[in-house]
Amino acid sequence: MIAQDQDSRAAPPDEWVAKIRDTILSWGAEHSQSYPWRAPGLPVWEGLVAEFLLLRTRAGQAAPVFEEIQRQYPEARSFGDATEDRLNEMIASLGLRWRQPLFVRLARAIADCGGDVPTTVEGLKELPGVGDYVAAATAAFHGGTRAAIVDANIVRLLCRLTGEQQDGETRRKRWLLDLADRLTPEVEFRDYGYAALDLSMTVCRPRRPLCSHCPLAALCVTGQGRATAREPSSRMLPLSR
């Protein structure tokens, strides 16, 4: 018998994965949210700034800050030339003071390369303050590079779909990263990523999820359970190796 580590999981069937992916894409085509960083033709460096601002921050809070940056600093070099006090002031309303020195360093790095930032996850992660999520989101949404998006909302969505328990380390689990990657299309990765985020924020909410309005309810362990009980079902999704 082959030993398995504690993070191993049997992989969901390809058919189930394809249905989830197609359903999310179809839903997103009709329910896409509108934010300034989703505008076509956005420079990659501006997309990077937007994704940095969105760290642990609601889109509604980040939007006015991002738009102010766009107005005041239309060029990467002018953005990087802003004073440290001004940069700190601009993001103070978002809280999380630990981000301020990283934001300043990122602005300087963007200016140093003239706004020509990397478009791959690996390259983006070499920049100050850019971790796994910001790198993946920038690559997929703004850089034209396929990358699987994994944030707290996506973790919640995938755990509810599969009936898995969630904790602070789930986002790093191999089974979840593999599933997120399998769900991400080869071509429509940008549309899928935004649709998955929108669905997880507006329907598969942290509290009082709208399972009765969710297009994935029939494919979801938690959604099926809520149809007959108040608490999520403990049944596991039938998996195949």
Image (cartoon, rainbow, N blue to C red):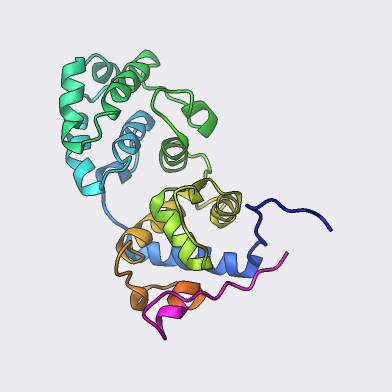
* Left or right: 88 in relation to 109: left
Q: Splitting the image into 4 quarters, where does residue 46 fall?
A: top left
Quadrant in which residue 207 is drawn: bottom left
Q: Position of residue 199 (x, y in %)?
A: 37, 62
User: Which residue is painted at 21% across and 31% down in the image?
Assistant: 70
Picture coordinates of residue 192, whole percent (x, y): 46, 55
Span highlighted in magenta in the image: 224-241
Q: Is residue 233 above or below residue 37?
A: below
Residue 227 appears left or right of 15: left
Is 237 within the magenta?
Answer: yes
Residue 203 against residue 87 in the figure, above or below: below
Q: Can you give x and y, in whole percent of width and height, for residue 162 in the image?
A: 53, 66
Image quadrant occupied by the C terminus: bottom right
Evaluate whether residue 154 shows in this view: yes
**Is residue 86 found inside the magenta-colored segment of the image?**
no
Q: Residue at x 50, y 53 (%)?
A: 188
